[in-house]
Image (cartoon, helix red, strand yellow):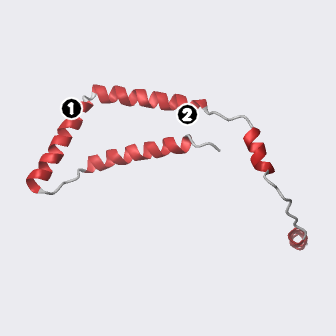
Amino acid sequence: MMENDDRLIKQFFTENKHEIADNGFSKRVMQTLPERRNHSVEVLNAITIAACIILFTLADGWQILWGNLQGFFIAIIKTGAVEVEPMALIGTGVVLVCLLYNKIMSMEY
């Protein structure tokens, strides 16, 4: 009995569905609403950037980066081929995931 009632109700609403013209009303309403700001994302971004700068400085990042670049170009010049280290790929992946996360969190809805 319940299944029959559900089917009849669904059929009724399907047959009597009427679309109401929007005429840009929704867009105008959305434009008049105040902008929502998620301050927790901004604070998290600031903390993350500060932590990255501190860790980069403590780990002597410029020296490591310069050494890796020198090794990279020397390997290209000597052998013509480049070997990719797994840790470099993991590091690159982590950075890309963080950038993607940051982009998603900063999107406005």
Give the class, few, some or many, for how many residues have Cα within 10 Å of label 2's Cα (few <14, many ≥20).
Answer: few
Q: Residue at x 24, y 31 (%)?
A: 62
Q: Residue at x 10, y 55 (%)?
A: 79
Quarter holding the C terminus is: top right
Residue corresponding to mark 1: 63
Number of dots carrying numbers: 2
Q: Could you tell me residue 44's position as x and y percent?
A: 51, 31
Say which label, 2 or 1, has the lower sequence index: 2
Q: Could you tell me residue 48's position as x and y percent?
A: 44, 31
17 relative position to 58: left or right: right
61 relative position to 36: left or right: left
Residue corresponding to mark 2: 41
Residue 38 appears in which quarter of the rendering? top right
Q: Could you tell me residue 108's position as x and y percent?
A: 62, 42
Q: Which structural element holds mark 2? A: helix
9 relative position to 69: left or right: right
Give the class, few, some or many, for how many residues have Cα within 10 Å of label 1's Cα (few <14, many ≥20).
Answer: few
